[in-house]
Amino acid sequence: MIQVENIARAAHTIDPIFTRSPQYRSEGLSARLGVNVIHKVESTNPIGSFKGRGVDWWFSQHTNHSHVVCASAGNFGQAVAYVGRKHGVKVEVFASENANPAKVEAMRRLGATVTQTGADFDAAKQAAATYANEKGLFYLLDGLVPEIGEGAGTMMVELADYPTPIDKFYVPVGNGSLINGVGAWAKAHVPHTKIIGVVAEAAPSMLMSWKEGKVVNTESAATIADGIAVRLPIPESLGPLAHAVDDMISVSEEEIIAAMQILFRDEKLVVETSGAVSLAAILKNAKQDAGCTVANLLCGGNIDADGLEKYLCA
């Protein structure tokens, strides 16, 4: 279970290369929307996403492993590979057969052995769990071990120091570690900041599970936002979710692409599909949030050449 005191410890322990990411007011979007929009940019580090925070914290607390297995759509695997290499730990990553080729190549470049199997991310997770069990290896599951969420929660520590109080923080929802971590810190230290989860309409399992208070699986998670394409929620993540989240909304594929294009054209920021869902939600809720200060989590920038051409240069 995520511990708030551990988030505070993590904020001083995690490799500084992953922390104190840029956070600043978007002049253009704030004027356009009538909403005070604060960007939290998590793509300016060696792996291009926020995932290094939680992984670095986990490795700092577990120094007895020489070989770990994980599953990833790409960003988590890059974090495990990068930090594992620093600690001299062998890393094996399971990714789906349809995983982003650039992310797969990045994981291999960072030293991980990558096995591609299964039609989607959840199938790769099941394969990774089976393999780790058969080999007697530790399976590092994003969304299950508390340290991953505690590391992610350090973003809220930083955002809480922003000069203007944050009314709402829009947070992408994948396996749940990210939002559970930031939500835990917010509820303990800045309860006026409402935590709003964001899922893709085409991958609604976490939204449905949050509403129902129990695991709700879906047959598919066919969204371009691969980092939050969850169809089989992790049961252990749902308990904390009930306390961490004030509301949750979904955004369409078209809204995600529109947000990516606005960030590229107007903000000079390149983000991947999952990295744009927070802004997509802010754009969708602009009238409701008029006059509020809202934070936008740009959680990753790992977009490949095909994605640039398809979504940004069309």
Image (cartoon, rainbow, N blue to C red):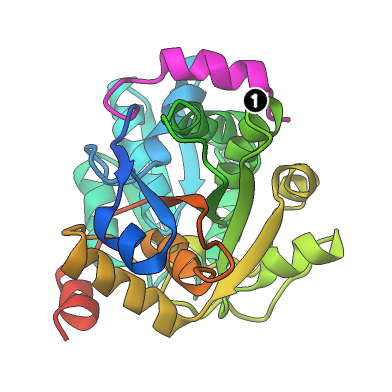
The x and y percentages for residue 300 are 33, 52
In this orientation, does residue 156 appear? yes
Q: Amino acid at mark 1?
A: His
In the depicted view, which residue is nearer to us: 256 or 146? 256
The x and y percentages for residue 234 are 70, 53
Residue 55 part of the magenta-drawn span: no
Which part of the image, by quadrant, shows the N terminus? top right
In the depicted view, which residue is nearer to us: 65 or 255? 255
Q: Residue at x 58, y 37 (%)?
A: 182
Instruction: Give above or below for 59 relative to 28.
Output: above
Q: Is residue 109 left or right of residue 112?
A: left
Q: Residue at x 16, y 59 (%)?
A: 268
In the rendered structure, which segment of residues is drawn in magenta? 1-19
The x and y percentages for residue 118 are 50, 71
Sort mark 1 into few (<14), some (14-19) or many (20+) by Cα contacts within 10 Å: some
Q: Is residue 88 left or right of residue 270?
A: right
The x and y percentages for residue 96 are 44, 67
In this orientation, does residue 63 appear? no
Instruction: Give above or below for 284 relative to 180.
Output: below
Q: Residue at x 23, y 41 (%)?
A: 44
Which part of the image, by quadrant, shows the C terminus? bottom left
- The residue under label 1 is 189
**Could you say which quadrant of the image residue 255 lies in?**
bottom left
Name the secondary structure under disc 1: helix
Numbered marks: total: 1
Q: Residue at x 51, y 25 (%)?
A: 58
